[in-house]
Image (spheres, grey):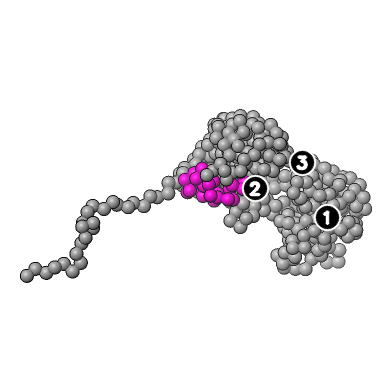
Amino acid sequence: MSKKPTTPFSKSELLPQAEMLEVAKRKGKLVIGIPKEAHFQEKRICLTPDAITSLTAHGHQFIIETGAGEAANYSDTDYSEAGAKIAYNRKEVFECSMVLKVEPPSLKEIDLMNPHTVLFSALQLKTQNKKYFETLAKKRITALAFDYIKDEQGSYPIVNSLSEIAGIASIHIAAELMSNAHSGNGLLFGNINGVPPTNVVILGAGSVGEFAARTALGMGAIVKVFDNSIAKLRNLQQILGTNIYTSTIQAKTIAKSLRRCDVAIGAIRGKLRAPVVVTETMVENMKDGAIIVDVSIDRGGCFETSQLTNHKKPTFTKHGIIHYGVPNIPSRYARTASVSISNIFSPFLQHIAEEGGFEQVIRYDKGLQSGMYFYNGILTNKTVADWFDLPFRDINLLIL
């Protein structure tokens, strides 16, 4: 007598079954152009050779204009050995599907781009005009301002990184100016036995103010920080791990502190223009040979006597006070700034590629969306629209 199977198969199980295959996410290979910066005294570059090496290993292609990295001490050979193609024609670089720049492109550079190019650069709203945005619209460019891009924590990584450089640099610049016997007081920035320590006033307790204070304290200075945000002042005390003089912005208190200080750092931003918190009268009452480094000069400056200067002629003297008003301080340290920008850009680019390309990732990545101000020629940034009286569309209605 035959045994019945203990686990009989049903008819449906005996029929051929559809095979379920796992569909791998298709990676997008990027073709990226990096032109040489043509803006006055701009020395930075978006990606270092090390970053190019890492990204080309994942199949991405780079076309870099000859001499693009020279100001940051990177040669064409460095980039060529990293896997990039060196272009001797600017048009070839701007014809790439994605273009990376530090400064916003000029109108002539936009003309070199192909329609629907993806552009990463700074926005620098205060220096733009209506024609610039109209030209981007005509070319149907998708443009992202890297200074508006957010990370997972909701902060602005590139802005924060460049602010750290500017804060540290402001103290080193002040120290250099102080020690110059022909212009400064011939003082050494620091705290030498038997010599009164350097007295530093910092206006603003954000990233620039934090790193300026950290650097000044490390050099032995007495530091006073002013800001109207008690939360920022409290946070600064905790971060620095030491008690420093802090105060809200009050005219009498600031005037008194400025009369005694050797160095004053302006690091107040403001939403549109930096508020002027130091009047010309306050500057007149400062010590002869004192130093003002107005880091907020790119937003108009927070000292009434501040004026724009440049890296070739960085200072001017008014009322016996030496003023430093260069708006692009990180470019003075081009190599450091380039490495810093590159370290932030590289993961973004790799993320875009791994998700299948820009069009795929922009649908859900809120951090990149926050940096976008044009999508295929349509303005998506309300601030820009209000500023220049241009039509605006919500990005969420365009990428569904």
| Residue 155 in the image, given as x and y percentages of width and height | 64, 55
Q: Which disc number belongs to residue 207?
A: none
Q: Amino acid at mark 2?
A: Tyr
Residue at mark 3 to residue at mark 1: CA–CA distance: 20 Å
Residue 366 colored magenta?
yes
Q: Amino acid at mark 3?
A: Asn
Q: Residues within 10 Å of mark 3 (few under 14, many from 20)?
A: some
Q: Which disc number belongs to residue 310?
A: 3
Q: Which residue is mark 1?
A: 263
Q: Amino acid at mark 1?
A: Val
What's the residue at 32%, 52% (across, down)? Answer: 20
Residue at mark 3 to residue at mark 2: CA–CA distance: 25 Å
Q: Is residue 342 left or right of residue 252?
A: left
Mark closest to the chain's N terminus, 3 or 1: 1
Q: Is residue 188 left or right of residue 33?
A: right
Q: For residue 370, say whether it is visible.
A: yes
Magenta segment, prevailing SS (helix, strand or loop)? helix
What's the residue at 76%, 41% (across, down)? Answer: 310
